[in-house]
Amino acid sequence: MKKEKIIIVGAGLCGSLLALRLAQHGYQIELIEKRPDMRKASISAGRSINLAFSDRGMKGISLVGLAEKVNELCIPMHGRMLHDQAGNSQLSKYSGRKGEYINSISRGGLNSLLLDEVEKHANVKMYFNYNCTDVNVENASAKFVHNETSEVLNLEADFLFGTDGAGSVVRKSMMKNPNLLFSFSQNFLTHGYKELSFPPTDNGNYATEKGALHIWPRGENMLIALPNLDGSFTVTLFLAYEGGKYNFNNLTNPEIVDEYFKEVYPDAYALMPDLKTEYFENPTAPLGTVRCLPWHFEKTLIMGDAAHAIVPFYGQGMNASFEDVFVFDQILQEEEFDLNTSFERFSKERKKDGDAIADLALDNFHEMKAHTAQEVFLAKRKLELELEEKFPNEYYSKYSLVTFKEDIPYSEAIQQGRAQDLVIQEMIKKGLLPEDMSLEDKLNRIKKATKMAMNNELIFNLEEI
Ligand SMILES: Cc1cc2nc3c(=O)[nH]c(=O)nc-3n(C[C@H](O)[C@H](O)[C@H](O)COP(=O)(O)OP(=O)(O)OC[C@H]3O[C@@H](n4cnc5c(N)ncnc54)[C@H](O)[C@@H]3O)c2cc1C
């Protein structure tokens, strides 16, 4: 049994998984959460009722032995179901390899399962309803105030983790420390999001195809929908705050909301009987990217969204946070449970992957709302699926590298994926991958040009490859 005492601030997805893993190693854990215990109180998940869960997330979950239990919460989504304005739909599979898909999972269900498992460990003490207001990052002590009674709780430990999300108080305490040169940036998108829903049909069935992530790409804006276990879908509208005919700032009354959805998303509109109520009851929330450096100082380390909050368009924020726990655990074992060295190594070694997934998520924002419906994009996807099917061990699209190839870091996936995307799109536009060329020749051409692009060699003369 390891004697060191550890404070973990924030029992969201990352903090709960981290607490479980460190408890399994025998550390003395105090896990403190600002909100009430979600397993007892009926609290709104706050944001994104369901999430896309994939292989990097599963790596963290498998580490703590919960793969089977988590699988029971999953609904497989095999591809993107693209819906055009005329009401036509088309499935674009996520991968040409067999058995590669992503899942829709309930945030509350997953977080509750993790808390149940944490609670089984006698070496963990959990506190709910305590808001962390201040952290001494040099000596791992923190102040918490009870939300209802205002009782103050001062805790001290040997080490402290901040897994308190995008608005992290632990990160802010690092920023305030005069002994640390802390770099920080926060960038908001011009778009916000709002959650809506498709209820189940009268006989309890799903209102549309269950096994897909639905997207209604409309140039600047889009609607997406993910299935829930109860037969409903959680629908998210991503819309600009201003500009264009419709935006969050001018959708101010039920008539105009009705008009917007009828005009722009007619088939989805037909599945939303509660649209107008939900639109005005549910909050509109901003979307942003947080980057900072370093992620550790003295006895404190931040992880998950606290270290790298990203926009949700790759469905990777939670997956990256779970992968953080996996990577940290690997380092911890390599360092024979020396937490000082592990903090330093994690902060240095993982940062580039946090940056990479932040950039990839921004790439996908543009791809999902606009490109998914474009001809070149569709032709590229068709070819990539054929390559993945015929050469499953040799070809991985950018999406597959990020989502299904959990044995390579995000920082490698972005390099190869971006180069590949550029090369294929250019080759398609220039007619360099004609129908009558064999798939093998296409693969070789793409691989050669990708390698050159990754080595920063100019590829003006793609024709010569
Ligand atoms: C609209 C949307 C859709 C998303 N979709 C996906 C998706 O499909 N797939 C995916 O992988 N990711 C997705 N994400 C990202 C994902 O939600 C986050 O990356 C993930 O929740 C990060 O986990 P975390 O534990 O680091 O932070 P959080 O989940 O934010 O948890 C932080 C916890 O800390 C607590 N806390 C905060 N402040 C304090 C304090 N002062 N004191 C004590 N406790 C505190 C909070 O109450 C919370 O419980 C999405 C995000 C959004 C906004």
Image (cartoon, rainbow, N blue to C red):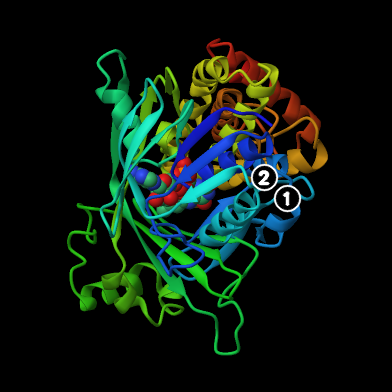
Describe residue 429's horizontal placement relative to residue 223 as left or right: right
At a point 31% along the width and 18% down the height, the residue shown is: 182
SS class, disc 1: helix
Question: Which quarter of the picture shows residue 302?
Answer: top left
Residue 350 higher or lower than 112, as above or below: above
Q: Residues within 10 Å of mark 2 (few under 14, many from 20)?
A: many
Circle nearer the N terminus (1, 2): 2
Question: Which quarter of the picture shows residue 248?
Answer: bottom left
Name the quarter where the C terminus is drawn.
top right
Q: Residues within 10 Å of mark 1 (few under 14, many from 20)?
A: some
x, y percent for residue 346: 54, 21
x, y percent for residue 72: 71, 62
Number of numbered tags placed on the structure image: 2
x, y percent for residue 2: 65, 29
Name the quarter where the N terminus is drawn.
top right
Pick the residue in front: 103 or 116. Answer: 116
Pick the residue in front: 256 or 191. Answer: 191
- Cα separation between marks 1 and 2: 6 Å
x, y percent for residue 420: 60, 28
- Contact check, label 1 and label 2, Cβ < 8 Å: yes
Q: Amino acid at mark 2?
A: Ile
Q: Residue farthest to the bottom?
A: 202
Describe residue 400's horizontal placement relative to residue 251 as left or right: right
Q: Which mark is residue 212?
A: none
Please give the residue where the numbered disc 1 appears in the rendered image.
Answer: 67
At a point 69% along the width and 51% down the height, the residue shown is: 101
Q: Amino acid at mark 1?
A: Ala
At a point 44% along the width and 68% down the height, the residue shown is: 41
Please give the residue where the numbered disc 2 appears in the rendered image.
Answer: 61
User: Is there any visible trace of residue 253 in the rendered image?
Assistant: yes
Pick the residue in front: 283 or 93. Answer: 283
SS class, disc 2: helix
